[in-house]
Image (cartoon, coloured by chain):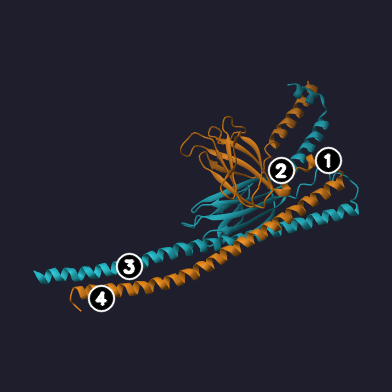
Chain colours: A cyan, B orange
Amino acid sequence: MRLVNSLNRVGPLTLFYLLIIVILVCQIIGSVGAVELTFELPDNAKQCFHEEITEGTLSTVEFQVVTGGNYDVDMSLEAPNRQILYKGIKKQFDSFTWTAAQSGIYTVCFSNEFSTFSHKLVYMDFQVGDEKPLPGVGEQLSAMTKMESSSVQVHENLNTIIDYQTHHRLREAQGRKFAEDLNSKVLYWSVGETLAILVIGIGQIIILKNFFTDKKTVSKS
Amino acid sequence: MKSNILPSLYTTIFLVSMSCLLYIVDGLYFHITETERKCFIEEIPDETMVVGNYKCQFYDPKTGGFMPSSPGIGMHVEVRDPDDKVMLSKVYSTEGHFTFTSHIPGEHVICLYSNTTKWFSGSQLRVHLDIQVGEHAVDYGNVAQKEKLTELQLRVRQLLDQAEQITKEQNYQRYREERFRGTSESTNQRVLWWSITQTFILLVMGFWQMKHLKSFFEAKKLV
């Protein structure tokens, strides 16, 4: 009530300016952020992620399948007006960048519904807007000094390096998990086949002996 | 009369617009059922800090939407290290913030599930989640305030943190490659031993079968 009264006393123009400032602040809050998630997608399952994006924001969705089956997954990107912006069928990795044409909730869905028994491990990177600037930095209105512009360049280069490292890690994880899988398969198969040879060898002898033992009793009687 | 209405009108418009903007927070979200357990895997080097923020909303069947704040339910956050040992297992309220630092390099699993008492799927939950790893997890506003850094010093600090993260990741990459090589060599060894052993077993089986049958037929006076 007190708030309303105090707001009443403030002029409409001030209210308008306040609203503009709040809108701009919320634009910033709703316009930045990057989330990297690695999750498991069971067979015949679908997983969707939603994000509120404001109009005009450049966003990127990137995904890569780390383990599972044929290393493929279906992915779709839906805009707030139900328009399908991107649809990839059985892709191993891909990246899609778009500028939001309208504000609203954008949905990214990963589907493993075509697979009957292989669950997939999927890496996803959902980036909305530009990177959040350092607090207290960038508020100056004057041009940046040489030091500042070179530090910005170094920062961007380091970001690229970290991105490359992530992709390298994912590719290496793919190979490594396959090798570990192969290693355990070889162990199980060798033990299994040894047992099978022993069982078959002894079984053959026993069955053969049975044939001759029966004949003997038949011939006796 | 007019002078009384107009200010309240502007105030109403302002407040309504403000309340509409309140929903543009908490980035990415997804839906899970009450009893479902959702896990995320983070493959990180050692001594890396991971910060997670989440917010949980209950589905309100009356309005067909999600309640802005749901009392009573809590989210159980469980973090396991690569050796499957529990690092962090706490129940937080509907809105929470968790942090952990890895001691062993490898795959850490972060699991979220609600502390519901139901046994099978109840209502839907909307979970907003934000996980930041390593350099992204550092709160530079805090750092600047505590250590009283200028703008340029803060930028350089960020660059140093990034370079440190890159070094740790490269180190971890070396460790992973070593493991990969070890696995491949182990597979090679296993295949070699298996083929030798299998040949040996086949030969032994063959000899034993023939010897056994020969003695059997000699006993039966058929040979």
> Total label count?
4
Taking A192 as reference, is A101 left or right?
right
Residue toward you, B202 or A37: B202
Corner quadrant of residue A192 = bottom left
Q: Which mark is on residue B214?
A: 4
Screen quadrant of the N terminus of chain A: top right
Q: Are marks 3 and 1 on the same chain?
A: no
Pointer 3: residues within 10 angstroms few (<14), some, or many (20+)?
A: few
What is the spatial separation of the Cα atoms under label 1 and label 2, in whole angstroms? 29 Å
Pointer 2: residues within 10 angstroms few (<14), some, or many (20+)?
A: many
> What residue did someone put label 2 on?
A30
User: What residue is at 48 percent from the left and 35 percent from the top?
Assistant: B118
Q: Are marks 4 and 2 on the same chain?
A: no
Q: Which of label 3 and label 1 is nearer to you?
A: 3
Screen quadrant of the C terminus of chain A: bottom left
Q: Is B117 drawn above or below residue A146 in the view shown?
A: above
> What residue did someone put label 1 on?
B147
Q: Is B4 drawn above or below residue A68 in the view shown?
A: above
Q: Residue furthest bottom?
A: B223
Residue A213, image x, y percentages? 18, 69
What is the spatial separation of the Cα atoms under label 3 and label 1, in whole angstroms? 75 Å
Q: Are marks 1 and 4 on the same chain?
A: yes
Q: Which of label 1 and label 2 is nearer to you?
A: 1
Marks 1 and 4, the one that precedes in the sequence: 1
What is the spatial separation of the Cα atoms under label 1 and label 4, in whole angstroms? 91 Å
> What residue did someone put label 3 on?
A200
Q: Are marks 1 and 2 in contact (CB under 8 Å)?
A: no
